[in-house]
Amino acid sequence: MAGNSFGKLFKLTTFGESHGPAIGGIIDGCPAGLKLDFEAIQNELDRRKPGQSKIVTQRKEPDTVEFYSGIFEGVTTGTPIGFVIHNTNQKSKDYSHIKDVYRPSHADYTYDKKYGVRDYRGGGRSSARETASRVVAGAVAKQMLNNLKINAFTSSVGDIFLDKPYQDLDFSKIESNVIRCPDEASAEKMIAKVQEVKKQGDTIGGTITCVLQNVPVGLGEPVFDKLHAELGKAMLSINAVKGFEYGSGFCGARMKGSEHNDKFNKDGSTQTNLSGGVQGGISNGMDIYFRVAFKPVATTLQKQYTINSSGETVEMQGKGRHDPCVVPRAVPIVEAMAALVLADYMLLDKTSRL
């Protein structure tokens, strides 16, 4: 299986399956001399881990990260950083009923056809549990990025939207509720919606907005390695993501050029920021903001018809512990992937200027 690595200079390679003994990764390219805050890294994992509230999967995993290389006396040495997160609460029997059954909208069918074998326990390698390794690497990248600010938050659940510009939000309130929405009134409605669909044995999707601030001018390349293109790739690599837009996004397609153009101030900043902090594939110093769409979790507790490996139509029903809405746990994953992109491009920018 290819495609287990992300990044050019600051590179993450992940390994492991949802119901295997452990998951983990190797961070290559992290500069030497970075003093790590291990508590901050664990805090990022705690934001993503299962079982943290009544509106997420009740699988209980401590998600404690153990580092094995690349760090000496709390400081990075410049060599590959290897780490492991042990799985402790697998219930593989919950998946025995789908051993030969393809769950609708899952990776079961495509994995089986491509590789001729699949780990059906929790989705194996296709499980969102793999993203815990991304959060570890993203937490390291955040510490490398110094004064850059990365804040993601839930901006919609189903048809309930947070209809306020991010400039009017207090990012310190993102962690004040289980849905991770910085607006209290919107958060209450979102939580109620998730609880409603959970009682129905169903799931629901939503969106996450992410804001990157204090990004220097000049990150990104103007052709194939555009900064926003890499951010899009990073976000679309996250499980359950169905869409990505930055700046004015799809709304910009309805505007005229005279309305959409960001007029310059004398210092090079712009009076508006419909470009979303990126012009010509290169960061312009303004805030970079984007939105990521997550589909409803494919596993529901309602009965569905599907096919098995013999091509027969069968009835199935989801079992086990699943998120009714993946969005609140995906917030730190979005931040982590954004941090990986920025860390990689910061290093690439340094090498290009040598």
Image (cartoon, helix red, strand yellow):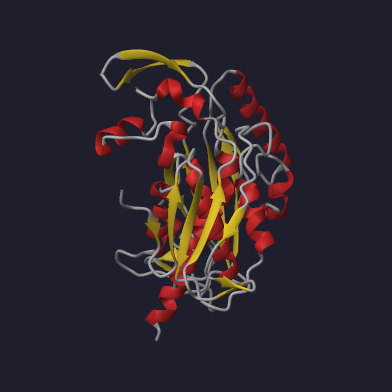
**Quarter of the image containing the C terminus?**
bottom left
**What residue lies at 61% left-to-right and 44% top-to-bottom?**
49
**What residue lies at 51% left-to-right and 53% top-to-bottom?**
133
Q: Horizontal placement of 308 versus 304: left or right? A: left
* Above or below: residue 142 compared with residue 182: below
- Count of residue discs: 0
Q: Which quadrant of the figure has residue 9? A: bottom left
- Between 91 and 76, the one nearer to me in the picture: 91
Q: Horizontal placement of 280 versus 159: left or right? A: left
Q: Is residue 168 visible?
A: yes
**What residue lies at 35% left-to-right and 13% top-to-bottom?**
314
**What residue lies at 43% left-to-right and 38% top-to-bottom?**
124
* Above or below: residue 163 compared with residue 289: above
Q: Horizontal placement of 217 versus 107: left or right? A: right
Residue 308 placement (x, y as % from top left): 32, 20
- Between 95 and 275, the one nearer to me in the picture: 95
Residue 234 placement (x, y as % from top left): 43, 54
- Between 260 and 126, the one nearer to me in the picture: 126
Q: Horizontal placement of 191 versus 270: left or right? A: right
* Above or below: residue 262 compared with residue 20: below
Residue 281 placement (x, y as % from top left): 38, 65
Residue 34 placement (x, y as % from top left): 59, 75
Q: Which quadrant of the figure has residue 257? A: bottom left
Q: Is residue 155 visible?
A: no
